Image: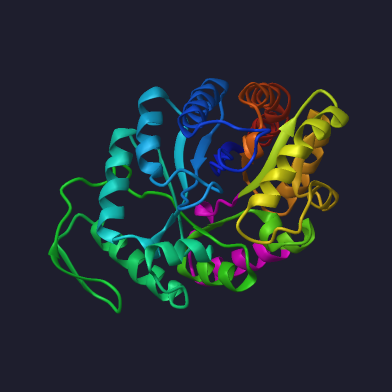
Amino acid sequence: MEFGLFTVFDNYQNHSETFKRTPDQFLQEVLDQTVRADELGYDSVWFAEHHFSEYGILTTPQMLLAVAAARTKQIRLGVSIVTLPFKNPIQVAEDYALLDVLSNGRLNLGLGSGYLPHEFAGFNVEGKDKALRFNDSLAVIEKAWTGETFSHHGDYYEFTDVKLEVLPRQKEVPIWIGTLTHNGANHVGKMGYNIMGIPYVACNSISELKGIVDSYKEQYLASGHDEKKIKVPLALHTYVAETTEEAEAVAKPHLDLYLDTRMYGRNAKFEDLRDKEQVLVGSPEHVIQTLKKYQEAGCDHIMLLMNFGGLPHEKVMKSMELIANEVMPAFKSEAVKVVSE
């Protein structure tokens, strides 16, 4: 099991008087959390991209990740996700190739087709054909990263005799596609890419999630792709304290704010996610036991969504340290044991 931090960048400057902070304050807090995660031995950090709403204020993750690259040494730098229908695919290929170079080959690239109507409206892009537009864009990026002069004549994008001068440092940039629906996951499996997502958005239980992941893997392997390349990162809201009672008391108002202000499905509350085991809120022992269930369901990289709903920076940092000191060793030592056997 690998451990990463995931930030949606939900900020409530215009919404909540209780958890108010400026965008620049939040951006600096996230950078400080990223540096501390690198020091504590976390495997990755992931930044979300959103537009036109306090639901997510980071519009260009590659810019903040470049700053993070300069301040860190080992941690991998991920975006979750780049919404391809809103972008020129050549620009995506150029920007993230440069980020991979600047970070010395630490890029994790998450891609998606988008899901928020207000973002499609803001960019004046039709949502009904987003999957086709996504596929056309991904094909351009794949061609661009070969380093060869290429042309592309698709339904949405056309380029003639284009060649990038700056290519990713990694020979093969790891790519994930955001989906946890049965049909979406199976399609991605046939394509030979990895899936990623937030379980509570698409699933009602860990067992349902396991069925989706199992089906994805079956399609992936049946299509002849390399089993060794499978890696399934899943994102869960996380807060760890010395006791479960303390963790729930701290996390509940912040998670409820996040759920109340997200741009889709606003009916869920903290108790709903807790009862379905779709959050990691509790003591280290409680979180370890829940994580083992996700590991059994096929998750091998947990994206800890820790700074949600205006949760104070100092509490996020303390939770990060508890996880590094008391949760992560339970899985790292397990890996060492398997290798030694």
Of residue 87 and residue 140, the one placed in the foreground of this image is 87
Q: Quadrant of the C terminus?
A: top right
Residue at image position (55%, 44%) is 8
In the image, is residue 80 part of the stretch drawn in magenta? Answer: no
Question: Vertically, is 142 above or below 32?
Answer: below
Snapshot colouring: rainbow
Residue at image position (52%, 20%) is 39
> Where does residue 164 sit, x and y in percent of width and height?
18, 53
In the image, is residue 229 part of the stretch drawn in magenta? Answer: yes
**Residue 14 lies in quadrant:** top right
Residue 300 horizontal side relative to residue 289, left or right:
left
> Where does residue 44 sit, x and y in percent of width and height?
52, 36
Residue 108 horizontal side relative to residue 198, left or right:
left
Provide the residue span drawn in magenta: 211-233
Q: Quadrant of the N terminus?
A: top right
> Where does residue 124 sit, x and y in percent of width and height?
38, 68
The rendered magenta stretch, by its main secondary structure, is classed as helix
Question: Vertically, is 320 above or below 63?
Answer: above
Residue 242 horizontal side relative to residue 264, left or right:
right
- The single residue placed furthest to the right in the displayed view is 245
Question: Vertically, is 217 above or below 286?
Answer: below
Residue at image position (72%, 60%) is 210
Of residue 137 and residue 186, the one placed in the foreground of this image is 137
Question: Vertically, is 301 above or below 149?
Answer: above
**Residue 111 lies in quadrant:** bottom left
> Where does residue 113 sit, x and y in percent of width and height?
46, 65
